[in-house]
Protein backbone atom coordinates (compact mmCIF):
# COMPACT_ATOMS: atom_id res chain seq x y z
CA UNK A 1 0.00 0.00 0.00
CA UNK A 2 1.15 3.53 -0.72
CA UNK A 3 1.50 6.45 1.68
CA UNK A 4 -1.37 8.88 1.13
CA UNK A 5 -1.75 12.51 2.15
CA UNK A 6 -4.80 13.34 4.26
CA UNK A 7 -3.71 16.95 4.83
CA UNK A 8 -0.37 18.73 4.56
CA UNK A 9 0.71 17.37 7.94
CA UNK A 10 -1.28 14.16 8.25
CA UNK A 11 -0.61 10.99 6.25
CA UNK A 12 -2.36 7.64 6.02
CA UNK A 13 0.18 4.81 6.33
CA UNK A 14 -2.06 1.89 7.29
CA UNK A 15 -2.69 -1.26 5.27
CA UNK A 16 -5.50 -2.89 3.31
CA UNK A 17 -6.40 -6.51 4.05
CA UNK A 18 -8.20 -7.44 0.84
CA UNK A 19 -8.53 -11.15 1.63
CA UNK A 20 -9.50 -11.33 5.29
CA UNK A 21 -12.89 -13.03 5.54
CA UNK A 22 -13.32 -13.54 9.29
CA UNK A 23 -12.60 -11.32 12.28
CA UNK A 24 -12.07 -12.73 15.79
CA UNK A 25 -13.10 -16.11 14.33
CA UNK A 26 -16.60 -14.70 14.64
CA UNK A 27 -17.44 -11.77 12.35
CA UNK A 28 -17.65 -12.42 8.60
CA UNK A 29 -15.80 -9.89 6.44
CA UNK A 30 -17.26 -10.20 2.93
CA UNK A 31 -15.45 -7.02 1.83
CA UNK A 32 -12.17 -7.44 3.71
CA UNK A 33 -11.04 -4.54 5.90
CA UNK A 34 -8.42 -1.86 6.41
CA UNK A 35 -6.17 -1.15 9.39
CA UNK A 36 -5.88 2.62 9.42
CA UNK A 37 -2.81 4.26 10.90
CA UNK A 38 -1.86 7.93 10.66
CA UNK A 39 1.42 9.80 10.76
CA UNK A 40 1.27 13.38 12.05
CA UNK A 41 4.30 15.58 11.38
CA UNK A 42 4.79 18.56 13.66
CA UNK A 43 7.61 21.08 13.54
CA UNK A 44 9.19 19.50 16.61
CA UNK A 45 7.75 16.00 16.99
CA UNK A 46 6.23 13.22 14.93
CA UNK A 47 3.31 11.16 16.19
CA UNK A 48 1.73 7.94 14.99
CA UNK A 49 -1.91 7.12 15.71
CA UNK A 50 -2.48 3.38 16.02
CA UNK A 51 -0.55 0.56 14.38
CA UNK A 52 -1.93 -2.35 12.34
CA UNK A 53 -2.76 -6.02 12.72
CA UNK A 54 0.46 -8.05 13.23
CA UNK A 55 -0.27 -10.02 10.04
CA UNK A 56 0.36 -6.76 8.14
CA UNK A 57 3.46 -5.75 10.08
CA UNK A 58 5.96 -6.00 7.20
CA UNK A 59 3.91 -3.83 4.87
CA UNK A 60 3.28 -1.36 7.67
CA UNK A 61 6.97 -0.89 8.41
CA UNK A 62 7.57 -0.51 4.67
CA UNK A 63 5.01 2.31 4.60
CA UNK A 64 6.80 4.08 7.45
CA UNK A 65 10.03 3.90 5.44
CA UNK A 66 8.26 5.12 2.30
CA UNK A 67 6.95 8.08 4.28
CA UNK A 68 10.56 9.08 4.93
CA UNK A 69 10.01 8.77 8.66
CA UNK A 70 13.22 8.25 10.61
CA UNK A 71 11.85 9.31 13.98
CA UNK A 72 8.63 8.72 15.88
CA UNK A 73 8.27 10.48 19.22
CA UNK A 74 4.75 9.48 20.20
CA UNK A 75 2.66 6.42 19.39
CA UNK A 76 -0.98 7.03 20.26
CA UNK A 77 -2.93 3.85 20.98
CA UNK A 78 -6.64 4.59 20.91
CA UNK A 79 -7.50 0.93 21.45
CA UNK A 80 -5.53 -2.06 22.76
CA UNK A 81 -7.10 -4.70 20.51
CA UNK A 82 -4.46 -6.33 18.35
CA UNK A 83 -5.75 -5.05 15.02
CA UNK A 84 -4.86 -1.59 16.38
CA UNK A 85 -1.87 -2.33 18.58
CA UNK A 86 -0.45 -5.60 17.26
CA UNK A 87 2.55 -4.01 15.54
CA UNK A 88 3.43 -1.88 18.57
CA UNK A 89 6.24 -4.13 19.88
CA UNK A 90 8.25 -3.92 16.65
CA UNK A 91 7.79 -0.14 16.52
CA UNK A 92 9.10 0.20 20.06
CA UNK A 93 12.19 -1.70 18.91
CA UNK A 94 12.64 0.40 15.80
CA UNK A 95 12.08 3.70 17.62
CA UNK A 96 13.59 3.26 21.11
CA UNK A 97 12.84 6.84 22.17
CA UNK A 98 9.15 6.67 21.25
CA UNK A 99 6.59 6.87 24.04
CA UNK A 100 3.14 5.27 23.98
CA UNK A 101 0.18 7.53 24.80
CA UNK A 102 -2.96 5.76 26.00
CA UNK A 103 -5.51 5.52 28.82
CA UNK A 104 -4.77 3.87 32.16
CA UNK A 105 -6.87 0.83 31.29
CA UNK A 106 -5.20 0.60 27.90
CA UNK A 107 -1.79 0.61 29.59
CA UNK A 108 -2.81 -2.44 31.63
CA UNK A 109 -4.14 -4.26 28.57
CA UNK A 110 -1.02 -3.52 26.52
CA UNK A 111 1.10 -4.98 29.32
CA UNK A 112 -0.97 -8.17 29.38
CA UNK A 113 -1.50 -8.57 25.63
CA UNK A 114 1.82 -7.35 24.21
CA UNK A 115 4.22 -7.09 27.15
CA UNK A 116 4.63 -3.35 26.62
CA UNK A 117 6.92 -2.03 29.41
CA UNK A 118 5.28 0.45 31.78
CA UNK A 119 8.19 2.88 31.44
CA UNK A 120 7.40 3.32 27.74
CA UNK A 121 3.82 4.44 28.44
CA UNK A 122 2.45 7.92 29.13
CA UNK A 123 -1.06 7.70 30.58
CA UNK A 124 -3.49 10.33 29.30
CA UNK A 125 -7.02 11.29 30.24
CA UNK A 126 -9.74 13.46 28.79
CA UNK A 127 -8.49 17.00 28.18
CA UNK A 128 -4.79 16.13 27.99
CA UNK A 129 -2.88 17.55 25.01
CA UNK A 130 0.30 16.75 23.13
CA UNK A 131 2.06 19.61 21.34
CA UNK A 132 3.98 18.46 18.26
CA UNK A 133 5.02 21.97 17.21
CA UNK A 134 2.53 23.84 15.04
CA UNK A 135 0.06 21.01 15.40
CA UNK A 136 -1.35 19.26 18.45
CA UNK A 137 -3.37 16.30 19.61
CA UNK A 138 -6.13 16.32 22.22
CA UNK A 139 -7.22 13.11 23.96
CA UNK A 140 -10.71 12.14 25.11
CA UNK A 141 -11.74 8.93 26.84
CA UNK A 142 -14.74 7.23 25.23
CA UNK A 143 -15.01 3.88 27.02
CA UNK A 144 -16.91 0.97 25.54
CA UNK A 145 -16.53 1.71 21.86
CA UNK A 146 -16.10 -1.19 22.06
CA UNK A 147 -13.65 -2.08 24.87
CA UNK A 148 -13.42 -0.38 28.29
CA UNK A 149 -10.14 1.41 27.51
CA UNK A 150 -11.01 3.13 24.22
CA UNK A 151 -10.35 6.79 23.51
CA UNK A 152 -10.44 9.17 20.56
CA UNK A 153 -7.84 11.69 19.48
CA UNK A 154 -8.61 15.11 18.00
CA UNK A 155 -6.33 17.34 15.95
CA UNK A 156 -7.83 20.86 16.20
CA UNK A 157 -5.50 22.50 13.67
CA UNK A 158 -6.47 20.01 10.94
CA UNK A 159 -10.03 19.49 12.28
CA UNK A 160 -9.59 15.71 12.20
CA UNK A 161 -11.16 13.31 14.68
CA UNK A 162 -9.32 9.99 14.90
CA UNK A 163 -12.40 8.13 16.11
CA UNK A 164 -10.98 4.69 16.91
CA UNK A 165 -13.56 2.00 16.01
CA UNK A 166 -16.50 4.40 16.18
CA UNK A 167 -17.93 5.36 12.75
CA UNK A 168 -15.82 2.70 11.01
CA UNK A 169 -16.58 -0.06 8.52
CA UNK A 170 -14.95 -3.32 7.53
CA UNK A 171 -14.58 -2.33 3.89
CA UNK A 172 -11.37 -2.82 1.92
CA UNK A 173 -11.08 -0.04 -0.63
CA UNK A 174 -8.29 1.78 -2.44
CA UNK A 175 -10.15 5.06 -1.90
CA UNK A 176 -8.86 7.09 1.02
CA UNK A 177 -12.17 8.92 1.43
CA UNK A 178 -15.67 7.52 1.08
CA UNK A 179 -16.73 7.61 -2.59
CA UNK A 180 -19.30 4.78 -2.66
CA UNK A 181 -21.96 5.89 -0.17
CA UNK A 182 -24.39 3.05 -0.87
CA UNK A 183 -21.80 0.31 -0.31
CA UNK A 184 -20.19 2.08 2.62
CA UNK A 185 -23.56 2.62 4.29
CA UNK A 186 -24.22 -1.13 4.20
CA UNK A 187 -20.74 -1.88 5.57
CA UNK A 188 -21.03 0.83 8.24
CA UNK A 189 -24.45 -0.40 9.38
CA UNK A 190 -23.18 -3.96 9.49
CA UNK A 191 -20.13 -2.82 11.48
CA UNK A 192 -22.34 -0.91 13.91
CA UNK A 193 -24.62 -3.93 14.34
CA UNK A 194 -21.82 -6.41 14.97
CA UNK A 195 -19.58 -4.29 17.17
CA UNK A 196 -21.21 -1.10 18.44
CA UNK A 197 -24.90 -1.94 18.97
CA UNK A 198 -24.42 -3.46 22.47
CA UNK A 199 -23.18 -0.01 23.59
CA UNK A 200 -25.96 2.00 21.93
CA UNK A 201 -26.84 4.09 24.98
CA UNK A 202 -23.24 5.21 25.54
CA UNK A 203 -22.73 5.95 21.87
CA UNK A 204 -25.80 8.21 21.84
CA UNK A 205 -24.07 10.44 24.40
CA UNK A 206 -20.78 10.30 22.52
CA UNK A 207 -22.44 11.48 19.30
CA UNK A 208 -23.66 14.57 21.15
CA UNK A 209 -20.10 15.22 22.31
CA UNK A 210 -18.64 14.74 18.82
CA UNK A 211 -21.18 17.15 17.33
CA UNK A 212 -19.78 19.89 19.56
CA UNK A 213 -16.35 19.57 17.89
CA UNK A 214 -15.22 21.49 14.82
CA UNK A 215 -14.60 18.52 12.52
CA UNK A 216 -13.84 18.38 8.80
CA UNK A 217 -12.70 14.75 8.68
CA UNK A 218 -13.57 11.67 10.71
CA UNK A 219 -10.74 9.15 10.46
CA UNK A 220 -11.87 5.78 11.87
CA UNK A 221 -9.64 2.78 12.43
CA UNK A 222 -11.32 0.73 9.69
CA UNK A 223 -12.74 1.65 6.32
CA UNK A 224 -12.64 4.89 4.34
CA UNK A 225 -12.32 8.32 5.95
CA UNK A 226 -15.36 10.58 6.12
CA UNK A 227 -14.84 14.09 4.72
CA UNK A 228 -18.54 14.79 5.19
CA UNK A 229 -18.90 13.99 8.90
CA UNK A 230 -22.62 14.74 8.95
CA UNK A 231 -23.23 11.80 6.62
CA UNK A 232 -22.09 9.19 9.12
CA UNK A 233 -23.29 11.11 12.19
CA UNK A 234 -26.85 11.24 10.86
CA UNK A 235 -26.86 7.49 10.28
CA UNK A 236 -25.49 6.77 13.72
CA UNK A 237 -28.14 9.01 15.27
CA UNK A 238 -30.80 6.97 13.49
CA UNK A 239 -29.31 3.59 14.41
CA UNK A 240 -28.78 4.51 18.07
CA UNK A 241 -32.16 6.20 18.54
CA UNK A 242 -35.10 4.34 20.06
CA UNK A 243 -36.93 4.45 16.73
CA UNK A 244 -37.58 1.19 14.91
CA UNK A 245 -39.02 0.41 11.49
CA UNK A 246 -42.40 -1.10 10.77
CA UNK A 247 -40.58 -4.36 10.10
CA UNK A 248 -40.74 -7.95 11.31
CA UNK A 249 -37.59 -10.06 11.15
CA UNK A 250 -38.16 -13.83 11.14
CA UNK A 251 -34.92 -15.79 11.62
CA UNK A 252 -35.79 -19.42 10.98
CA UNK A 253 -34.51 -22.96 10.66
CA UNK A 254 -36.65 -25.84 9.45
CA UNK A 255 -35.85 -29.55 9.50
CA UNK A 256 -38.73 -31.13 7.55
CA UNK A 257 -40.52 -28.09 6.18
CA UNK A 258 -43.24 -27.49 8.78
CA UNK A 259 -41.60 -24.48 10.41
CA UNK A 260 -40.75 -22.98 7.02
CA UNK A 261 -44.39 -23.30 5.94
CA UNK A 262 -45.40 -21.41 9.08
CA UNK A 263 -42.84 -18.71 8.27
CA UNK A 264 -44.24 -18.31 4.76
CA UNK A 265 -47.80 -18.18 6.10
CA UNK A 266 -46.89 -15.46 8.60
CA UNK A 267 -44.92 -13.56 5.96
CA UNK A 268 -47.96 -13.37 3.68
CA UNK A 269 -50.24 -12.33 6.53
CA UNK A 270 -47.88 -9.53 7.58
CA UNK A 271 -47.49 -8.30 4.01
CA UNK A 272 -51.28 -8.11 3.73
CA UNK A 273 -51.16 -5.73 6.69
CA UNK A 274 -48.57 -3.47 5.03
CA UNK A 275 -45.79 -4.57 7.35
CA UNK A 276 -42.29 -4.98 5.97
CA UNK A 277 -41.15 -8.53 6.66
CA UNK A 278 -37.81 -10.28 6.32
CA UNK A 279 -37.70 -14.11 6.54
CA UNK A 280 -34.08 -14.99 7.31
CA UNK A 281 -32.93 -18.56 6.73
CA UNK A 282 -30.28 -19.31 9.34
CA UNK A 283 -28.85 -22.39 7.63
CA UNK A 284 -25.34 -21.42 6.58
CA UNK A 285 -26.25 -17.76 7.06
CA UNK A 286 -23.93 -14.77 7.35
CA UNK A 287 -24.38 -13.72 10.98
CA UNK A 288 -23.35 -10.17 10.12
CA UNK A 289 -26.40 -9.81 7.90
CA UNK A 290 -28.59 -11.09 10.73
CA UNK A 291 -27.11 -8.53 13.11
CA UNK A 292 -27.67 -5.78 10.55
CA UNK A 293 -31.34 -6.73 10.17
CA UNK A 294 -31.70 -6.55 13.96
CA UNK A 295 -30.65 -2.89 14.05
CA UNK A 296 -34.09 -1.45 13.33
CA UNK A 297 -36.64 -4.30 13.26
CA UNK A 298 -39.60 -3.49 15.52
CA UNK A 299 -40.48 -7.17 15.94
CA UNK A 300 -38.45 -10.36 15.88
CA UNK A 301 -40.12 -13.76 15.52
CA UNK A 302 -37.82 -16.71 16.20
CA UNK A 303 -38.98 -19.71 14.18
CA UNK A 304 -37.57 -23.11 15.09
CA UNK A 305 -38.51 -26.77 15.27
CA UNK A 306 -37.87 -28.79 18.40
CA UNK A 307 -34.81 -31.05 18.42
CA UNK A 308 -35.30 -33.69 21.11
CA UNK A 309 -36.60 -31.42 23.90
CA UNK A 310 -35.41 -27.94 22.93
CA UNK A 311 -34.80 -25.51 20.07
CA UNK A 312 -32.68 -26.35 17.05
CA UNK A 313 -28.97 -25.68 17.83
CA UNK A 314 -28.78 -23.23 14.92
CA UNK A 315 -31.56 -21.18 16.52
CA UNK A 316 -29.82 -21.39 19.89
CA UNK A 317 -26.77 -19.77 18.30
CA UNK A 318 -28.88 -17.07 16.63
CA UNK A 319 -30.77 -16.30 19.84
CA UNK A 320 -27.49 -16.03 21.74
CA UNK A 321 -26.15 -13.60 19.11
CA UNK A 322 -29.34 -11.51 19.19
CA UNK A 323 -29.17 -11.27 22.98
CA UNK A 324 -25.49 -10.35 22.81
CA UNK A 325 -25.92 -7.37 20.48
CA UNK A 326 -28.90 -5.97 22.44
CA UNK A 327 -31.11 -4.64 19.63
CA UNK A 328 -33.83 -2.08 20.31
CA UNK A 329 -36.53 -4.58 19.28
CA UNK A 330 -39.96 -3.71 20.69
CA UNK A 331 -41.75 -7.07 20.34
CA UNK A 332 -40.70 -10.71 20.12
CA UNK A 333 -42.22 -14.16 19.87
CA UNK A 334 -41.62 -17.77 18.86
CA UNK A 335 -43.26 -19.97 16.22
CA UNK A 336 -42.49 -23.52 15.16
CA UNK A 337 -43.34 -27.18 15.18
CA UNK A 338 -42.55 -30.18 17.36
CA UNK A 339 -43.10 -33.91 17.26
CA UNK A 340 -43.81 -35.14 20.79
CA UNK A 341 -43.01 -32.37 23.26
CA UNK A 342 -40.28 -30.26 24.79
CA UNK A 343 -39.52 -26.85 26.26
CA UNK A 344 -38.49 -24.91 23.16
CA UNK A 345 -40.48 -21.77 23.97
CA UNK A 346 -39.20 -21.58 27.54
CA UNK A 347 -35.61 -22.15 26.46
CA UNK A 348 -35.70 -19.53 23.69
CA UNK A 349 -37.37 -16.80 25.76
CA UNK A 350 -34.96 -17.41 28.63
CA UNK A 351 -32.02 -16.84 26.25
CA UNK A 352 -32.90 -13.26 25.31
CA UNK A 353 -33.06 -11.27 28.59
CA UNK A 354 -31.13 -8.35 27.06
CA UNK A 355 -33.77 -7.88 24.39
CA UNK A 356 -36.17 -5.70 26.34
CA UNK A 357 -39.11 -6.64 24.16
CA UNK A 358 -42.72 -7.37 24.94
CA UNK A 359 -43.37 -11.07 24.30
CA UNK A 360 -46.29 -11.75 21.98
CA UNK A 361 -48.06 -15.09 22.60
CA UNK A 362 -46.24 -17.78 20.60
CA UNK A 363 -47.68 -20.16 18.03
CA UNK A 364 -46.23 -23.63 18.50
CA UNK A 365 -47.86 -26.66 16.90
CA UNK A 366 -47.55 -30.42 16.60
CA UNK A 367 -46.55 -31.62 13.14
CA UNK A 368 -47.52 -29.82 9.94
CA UNK A 369 -49.44 -26.51 9.87
CA UNK A 370 -53.11 -26.53 8.92
CA UNK A 371 -56.00 -24.06 8.74
CA UNK A 372 -56.11 -23.84 12.54
CA UNK A 373 -52.44 -22.88 12.46
CA UNK A 374 -53.17 -20.21 9.88
CA UNK A 375 -55.87 -18.74 12.13
CA UNK A 376 -53.45 -18.62 15.05
CA UNK A 377 -50.83 -16.94 12.87
CA UNK A 378 -53.48 -14.51 11.64
CA UNK A 379 -54.13 -13.51 15.26
CA UNK A 380 -50.38 -13.03 15.73
CA UNK A 381 -50.21 -10.84 12.60
CA UNK A 382 -53.18 -8.78 13.83
CA UNK A 383 -51.50 -8.32 17.20
CA UNK A 384 -48.25 -7.21 15.58
CA UNK A 385 -50.08 -4.79 13.29
CA UNK A 386 -51.96 -3.30 16.24
CA UNK A 387 -48.78 -2.98 18.32
CA UNK A 388 -46.87 -1.32 15.49
CA UNK A 389 -49.71 1.05 14.71
CA UNK A 390 -50.03 2.32 18.29
CA UNK A 391 -46.32 2.46 19.16
CA UNK A 392 -44.83 5.96 18.62
CA UNK A 393 -41.28 4.65 18.15
CA UNK A 394 -42.28 2.27 15.35
CA UNK A 395 -41.85 4.49 12.29
CA UNK A 396 -44.25 3.87 9.42
CA UNK A 397 -42.71 4.82 6.12
CA UNK A 398 -44.92 6.30 3.41
Image (cartoon, grey):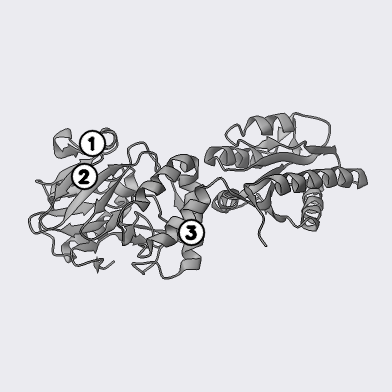
* Residue that mark 3 sits on: 187
For image coordinates 53% across by 41% down, the residue present is: 325
Towards the viewer: 361 or 86: 361
- Disc 2 is placed on an element classified as helix
Label 1 vs label 2: CA separation?
A: 8 Å
- Disc 3 is placed on an element classified as helix
Which comes before the other along the chain, label 1 or label 2?
Answer: 2
Do the numbered discs 1 and 2 sit on residues whose CB atoms are within 8 Å?
yes
* Residue that mark 1 sits on: 115
Q: Nearer the viewer, mark 1 or mark 3?
A: 3
Which comes before the other along the chain, label 1 or label 3?
Answer: 1
Towards the viewer: 232 or 34: 232
- Disc 1 is placed on an element classified as loop
Q: Where's residue 68, x and y in %?
A: 13, 64
* Residue that mark 2 sits on: 89
Which comes before the other along the chain, label 3 or label 2?
Answer: 2
Amino acid sequence: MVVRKVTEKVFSIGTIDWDRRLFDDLIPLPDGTTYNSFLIRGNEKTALIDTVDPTQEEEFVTNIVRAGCDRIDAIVVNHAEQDHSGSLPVLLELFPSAQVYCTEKCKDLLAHLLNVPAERVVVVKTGDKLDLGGISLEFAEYPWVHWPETMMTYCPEEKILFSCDLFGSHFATSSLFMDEPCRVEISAKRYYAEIMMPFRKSITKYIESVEQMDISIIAPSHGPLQNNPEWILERYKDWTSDNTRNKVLIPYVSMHGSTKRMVLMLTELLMERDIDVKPFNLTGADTGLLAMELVDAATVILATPTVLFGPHPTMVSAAYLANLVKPKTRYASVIGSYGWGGKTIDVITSMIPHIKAEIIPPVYITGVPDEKTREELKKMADTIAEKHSSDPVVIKEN
